[in-house]
Amino acid sequence: MLGVPAASAATTAALFLAGIVAVVLVLYLARRRVRALHTVELLVVAAVALSLVALPWIGWRFVEDLRVTTKLDPYERANMGPIQAYIPGYLVQGVHIRGTWTTDVGPQPNDIARSAFPSLVLVKLFPRLSAPPDRADWIIRWGYDRAHPYRVAVKRR
């Protein structure tokens, strides 16, 4: 999600290191039981141990994402991607369609704006359904007109 801070390399490394230390400690304490296991059971223990290594980072990431996203107001929650990409919400205000739709973004906008445009259309056209390009009734195009970079074209298939 755009707007949610990424984890630093140092934080990620420290949390994975904590996970490794915790798993090694648990395996050390349970070494007698682990030695008595058969091959298939050892594989299960190894898979669980590898999964548990990431648990501190996953927990931290979950808490960090909640810390950021729970402070958002309803408008920000609905438009987070387009807001972060500086796409104005009124860009698709006049688009009124019936049936299914798909988006087509041209080369004009930057990469972040191009990836956020489908989210903006999805929010604005809800509850109308999106569809794959070959089955959509309408195509909502943006970013092709150099003279009018913020013009959105709606084309019936």
Image: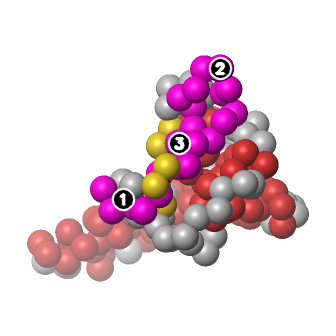
Q: Position of residue 72 (x, y in %)?
A: 84, 60
**N-terminal-most mark, 1 or 2:** 1
Instruction: Judge whether 144 appears above or below 67 on screen.
Output: above
Query: Could you tell me if the residues under marks 2 and 3 are in contact, i.e. CB atoms within 8 Å?
Result: no
Q: Amino acid at mark 2?
A: Ala
Check residue 143 for magenta coloring.
yes
Q: Residue furthest left?
A: 39
Residue behind mark 2: 147
Q: Amino acid at mark 3?
A: Arg
Q: Residue at x 20, y 69 (%)?
A: 43
Q: Quadrant of residue 48?
A: bottom left
Q: Residue at x 49, y 71 (%)?
A: 99
Q: Position of residue 62 (x, y in %)?
A: 65, 63
As helix, strand or loop, the secondary structure at mark 1 comes to: loop
Residue behind mark 3: 141
Q: Residue at x 21, y 71 (%)?
A: 42
Query: Could you tell me if the residues under marks 1 and 3 are in contact, i.e. CB atoms within 8 Å?
Result: no
As helix, strand or loop, the secondary structure at mark 2 comes to: loop
The label shown at residue 132 is: 1
**N-terminal-most mark, 1 or 3:** 1
* Separation of marks 1 and 2 at Cα, in angstroms: 29 Å
